Amino acid sequence: MTISDLALLKERFETLTERESSDHVALNCVSSQLIEVCTALRDDFGYDMLVDVTGIDWDAQSPRFTGIYHFFSTTKHEYLRVAADCTDDINPALPSLTGLYASANWHERETYDLMGIRYQGHPNLTRILMWDAYPYHPLRKDFPLAGIEVPLPAADVAEVTGMSVKPAPMVGGPFVSSADGPMSQTEPRARDESWNEKKIKPHGK
Amino acid sequence: MQNTTIAYDSKVEGEIIVTQADAVINWIRKHSVWPMPMGLACCAIELMAAGGARFDISRFGMEVMRFSPRQADCMIVAGTVTYKMAEVVRRIYDQMAEPKWVVAMGACASTGGMYRSYATLQGVDQIIPVDVYVSGCPPRPEALLDAMIKLQDKIGTERSVNNLFPKKADSKEVAGATKGS
Amino acid sequence: MATSKEISIGDAGARASESEGELQGETMMLNVGPSHPTTHGVLRLKMELDGDVVKKCEPVLGYLHRGDEKIAENMTYNQFIPYTDRLDYIAPLSNNVAYAMAVEKLANLEVPERCEAIRLLCCELARVSSHLLGVGVYGMDAGAWTVFMYTFTEREKLYTLFEELTGARFTTSYTRIGGVARDIPEGWLGRVLEFCKGVLPVLDQVDKLLTRNRIFMDRTVGIGTISKEDALAYGLTGPNLRACGVDLDLRKDKPYLGYENYDFEVPIGTNGDCYDRYLMRAEEIRQSVGIIRQCIGKFPEGSYYAEDAKKIFAPQKAKVLTSMEELIQNFMIVTEGPQIPAGEVYFEAENPKGALGFFIHSKGGGVPYRMKIRGPSFCNLSILDKLIPGHFLTDITVILGSLDFVMGECDR
């Protein structure tokens, strides 16, 4: 985005602020103005493709969830990142961009599925990658990588095989050590240790 | 007990070969295994390569890749099985007619592979009984052919005649059980 | 008067013949299940059919969702490279390169020219490999088995080349953050040129079998037409987008890896139907062969990794075992991961299937805080519920084959 375009955009929407970024121009937007800003981006500034919609879970901070949008202009060959914080930490919600860009449909379903951000105005906000009855939002920071035990999606198969969705064994897992602290305490260990030599597998087979 | 063909051609009866029924049935079965490729992920590409001209699974009588479970003998689970896909794999396994075998191809099908996460079934043997495990990520087509040869050897040791007339009419398939011991 | 007799028939067909308007029938629900030979990978289509015509189509994904993004939050940057192989598992080298470039952008790291040339060669070979499979399997879907056999034989030659370079036929895990794993072997470039010489006649044969084939054209011309506006709105990228007439190729428009130094054309289609998409891929193979030849012609000397990236690229093994500083450096990089500074980056590379994007938010350290993988097949498939209704059931095979998607990067 050129400097003059950026200045024009900021003039029109005073709530936009610049966001720190390592590559493209990035803006912070208020979630209530998101649809207006995106309409202006598409119609007036030439960002005709919405390439990605995702979210970040900041865990212990407030606001806890931020929706990240990436736009691309096929005429100017430039990317733009727009970040919108969700005002509610317990039930995060953002307005849906499906009216503006058709690609938002599946991306927003995926972000809802994995992060739990509800998109208001979405025509069919259902899970897309996990099965419909899955109770958790896996990409949230309080959800362990190994998973939490839930029944299998198909009841008849669960009955015949006696299986359920079990947490994955993490022992011997990818070893990572944190960079801070004395070396004696930062021995490489698996980051997610819901199951290791000291703690037995929660629901052993 | 190895069911090697014990045969003799008797000059008294004429050109008749006498052997064990098991030997004949197993010989027929093992040289015409029709795989059902449950190609889920990257291992499916190596499975296709094994069916291609360079590695040629057709030499073993296995180029007839039947995608319909009713017409297949051996289900080759090639790729990561997720929990969402697990019910599909199990249903398709149930639709296959006896005798049937399962080859877990690759690390993901054998034990979940490197995907230790909330969505991946840690090994397809948790829902269906597996006969041969092939390690590798993905296993080379030669490794798959080696596994199919081992499967052929395994088929050769089965008590086929006993299994033709099972004692219980409605025996339930138990996960983890192996057949033909 | 007595000639006509009133008979009441309780039959749908007779009811239909009585009514003035169209035939009233019932629609049938058909499930093209996740395990199906024509859906390349595990894609499920829930369809409502009226006779032979599809009225509604709902794709169901997620049968290969393995949790890659969550795994990335628990691994160092180098440990995640094997997972990137398995995203688009038909052209793994290009995924490796795209990921390494995204992380290097975050670290503001420049790699030497030789490394860029190696990576470019890998990307283009991966493109040839992927399009060969795309065209081959597409021909197989349309009924031409021979095409599949020919292109697979060529791909086997590519596998031999990859194996010589990286150690694995595919799922190569060849790049590292800051460079590539090892330098190219002796004589490898000559063998690549030989392969290029061999693939073009095979492509000509495939061309002769398919391009003007009456049956193939009947099955693909005018089927699955996507308009320019739809393609942009749904976020299509790659050959699917270019077949609709949109001139967008990230190699030309946002060049990376030195693509601006090579002379190649980007094929653009006109109608956006299945036939055009096939032609795109066939022509792109030829263009890629041209790029490979140019690249080998002026292959630069130098180092294959960024030697000044002390905290990012592991040093040479010989030095690690003899010198103290390199030993410590190697230890830190392996245990704590390459130290990438804090920031946000989004980088898209022109992969054979489309634009593969990596969004990485890092808080410093060796492990990313959040990684989002934008898979091109995810976006390419989103158009299905608009595209398929109105076509015949037999056209589904052809449409899915022409979109050339991979479920690995769709579901991640």
Image (cartoon, coloured by chain):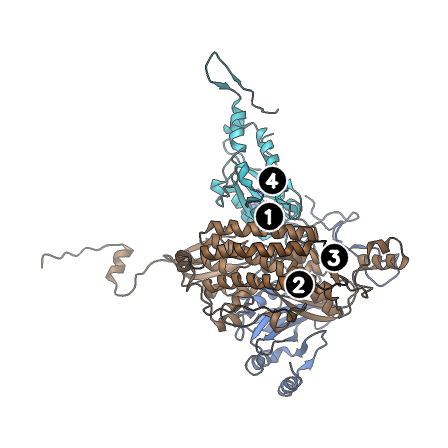
Chain colours: A blue, B cyan, C brown
Q: Secondary structure at mark 3?
A: loop
Viewer-nearest of discs 2 and 4:
2
CA separation, marks 4 and 1?
Answer: 11 Å
- Taking the view exactly as shown, the residue that stands out farthest to the right is C324
N-terminal label among 3 and 2: 3
Task: Give the distance between the C-alpha atoms of the residues marked 3 and 1, in whole angstroms.
Answer: 26 Å
Q: Secondary structure at mark 1?
A: helix
Question: Residue placed at 29% from the left, 56% from the top?
Answer: C12
Query: Label 4 lies in what chain?
Result: B
Q: Say if A110 sits above or below C170 in the image.
A: below
Query: What's under tag 4, amino acid-wise?
Result: Leu
- Foreground mark, 3 or 4? 3
Give the mark nearest the N terminus, 4 or 1.
1
Residue for badge 3: C183
Q: Position of residue A126 (x, y in %)?
A: 55, 63
Packing grade of label 3 (10 A; few <14, some 14-19, many >=20) is: some
Give the quarter of the image for residue C197.
Answer: bottom right
Amino acid type, label 3: Asp
Q: Identify residue for label 1.
A: B46
Q: Quadrant of the C terminus of chain A?
A: top right
> Which secondary structure lies at badge 4?
helix
Residue position marked by numbered label 2 in the rendering: C297
* Label 2: chain letter: C
Q: CA distance from mark 3 to mark 2?
A: 17 Å
Label 4 sits on residue: B145
Residue type at the position of mark 1: Glu
Q: Tell me what residue is drawn at x 52 percent, y 32 percent.
A: B29
Residue type for callout 2: Gly
Q: Residue drawn 83% across and 64% down?
A: C310
Q: Are marks 3 and 1 on the same chain?
A: no
2 and 1 marks on the same chain: no
